[in-house]
Amino acid sequence: MKRALTSLLAGVLTLAPATQAAEAPSFRNTIQPILTRYGCAMGACHGAAAGQGGFRLSLRGFDDEGDWLSITRSANGRRLTFEDPARSLFLLKAVKTVPHKGDKRFEVNSPEYKAIVDWIAAGAPGPKADDPRITSLSVAQPHLVTQGGKSVQLKVTAKFSDGHSEDVTRWCKYNATNASVATVDDAGLIKITGSGEGTVSAWYLSLLSVTTVTVPNPGKPNAEAFAAMKPRNFIDEHVLTKLRELNIPPSGRATDAEFLRRAFLDTIGVLPTPEEAKTFLADKAADKRDRLIDALLQRPEFVDYWAHRWSDLFLVNGDKLMPQAMWSYYNWIRRHVAANTPWDAMVRDLLTATGSTLEHGGGNFFILNDEPTKCAETVSVAFLGTSIGCAKCHNHPMEKWTYDQYYAFANLFARVRTKNGTQADERVLFSDTQGDLVAPLTGKPQPPRPLDALEPVSMTSTEDRRITLAKWLTSADNKLFQRAIVNRVWANFFGSGLVEAVDDLRVTNPASNEPLFAAACEHLVKQKFDLKALMRTILQSETYQRSSITQPENITDLRYGSHYVPRRLKAEVLLDTVSQVTAAPTTFKIDRRNANRGTADAYPMGFRALQLPDSNIASYFLKSFGRADRVATCECERTNEPSMAQALHIANGETLNTKLAQKDNRLDALLTSKQPDAKIIEEAYLLTLTRSPTARELEKATALLTSANPEDRRTTLEDLFWSLMSSKEFLFNH
């Protein structure tokens, strides 16, 4: 109905002769870019959901026909004056001849002004089915390496479906991501403001193109620092290339003690025992770090750690699932982690799940995501690292995904159905042979199609559409799938992804080291999506084994691998290490607000935080230290940022103080061990910091313990442990 009305109105309003109309500027390819370029179709102006001043446009001009109707027909057509285009309110507002809250957009007699005048004079023709469509957008300088204080003019070229190309530099909307490195004005002139790396994006019609701006640090390169770094694998080679490009010297190698603690915490989420630390530190073999890495990847704690990590991603949540279903979902994850199932196979098993959700735990993914649109958005974030949610209402403002693509993708899940099973808490998952998701704007379904697939799935086929989806998603040709998981694994070991935020893989948010990212993805595919193989390569790299101690020239680097960046331990890891050091287990009570909590009030004594299947655990500590609530698939749910609440809880909260005061804990064992005080101090440092105390630390702490009255020795030892466990050296991985 809408498109029919559009065609009728086009016949009424196109008043110019055919020859004139043929020469008129295109609404789709000329007028829309002007409205976007000058902010008229943006969210802060008429592109807002409610528009402005009674005039509404689609965000970034994604709805050509709707916008044309709004300009030409809303407000009784008073925005255009065909007999005298220069008197059109549409123009008078833009040049602020009449009052305009949006201020002046462009000048009288500017190319923009003339284009709109010509368009109105031609009868304001609307979008046509045979309008050339943009096929590509490119910048002449995709990777710009320059010096501070310089300016560079971008040149942007658009190619169209009819084969012609245009210089669209003037008509683009520009944005710079890192103003400390470079800014860009409305004309596409880049001004270098400092050293580092940033990006400048150019947006025209529905496409984006990006220029990476690299500005090396001033000063003479530190040849000695680079010469000392011997690459171990492709990671190091790409990192060193980037550091040389930016003139950022690398720090030296971490000590054995630093590496030992770091690798344990990042790989399995526990601290090495004093015995493990002594053995490793005393080992003189050149391959001891490699042997440690291999051992960690086989530890049972590895399963705990990574099952918990993927439970965050897959949203295992006892508030959303009944108890048996929740356990089934969690155990499905654990089995795959324990078997080291290749990531592609694990994801295929999840997405094509059928039958009982108690027998096939992965099927609970569809119980949690019980609508086609929820499935589409969760899958895109979890397995492609990109959000398509904005395209639910309009073309994505920051990415290439369109409204039509969104509903085509969501329609892949439209035939997923569930029914009650024969057991309590059981649902049975199956694929129906009919049913489609209707797109609200068009009133009809989009042919189901994976996001970047060329061909849609037949709408008449009765085959489970998820099979096609899973094949496309996990294909070795699907770069987004590879990038998403590589980025997540990388972020686990380095604190931030090659793309940050981790769930924000898009053209306008490029990787800190794109050649490295591509090489890591290629490595993953060669290893047949074996995540342990990827982890081993990361752990073995000199980049990962680099010291966290900075140099003046690399102190500001948080992304390029010149040094290991310290970060606070994850909530669950920190709580478990506190319990491990004190030998005082935590009692985890099931949150009584959880409607599906079952009959038990608590998990068995000895459960660690990393072994909990459910996020709905009543724990002030975990909540304060930023655990994920598992409500939405987003890394933003978890935070490792220090806060005042955390500092106060460590200083005065019940968790640390209660565990230190608990009877028959680690402190009592040390005091009754009959070891010399110096050995007790040594043990305390190894337990908490995975290192021996310095001579001065040993002298002072030993003197303090030795001089204490017998009745005060335990309190003195509590104070020592408290000081060690409240230090940054304990609370942070470094």
Image: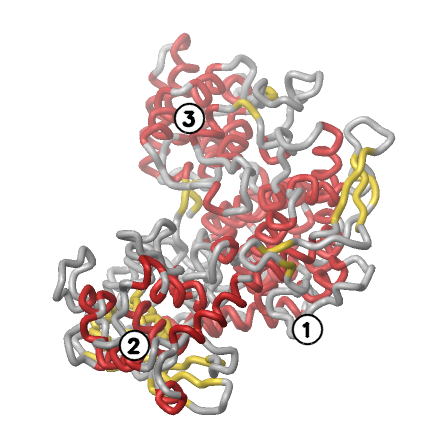
202 or 227: nearer the eye? 202
Percent across and percent down for residue 302 are 64, 45
Percent across and percent down for residue 562 are 37, 63
Residue 154 image-quadrant placement:
bottom left
Q: Amino acid at mark 3?
A: Phe
Q: Secondary structure at mark 3?
A: helix
**Distance CA(mark 2)–CA(mark 1):** 39 Å
**Which badge, 1 or 3, is on the more N-terminal residue?**
1
Please determine whether, in this image, residue 349 is positioned above or below residue 524: above
189 to the left or right of 57: left
Please determine whether, in this image, residue 361 is positioned above or below residue 432: above
**Distance CA(mark 2)–CA(mark 3):** 79 Å
**Residue of label 3:** 721
Percent across and percent down for residue 159 are 44, 85
**Which badge, 2 or 1, is on the more N-terminal residue?**
2
285 or 9: nearer the eye? 9
- Image point 63% across, 62% down: which residue? 408
Q: Nearer the viewer, mark 1 or mark 3?
A: 1
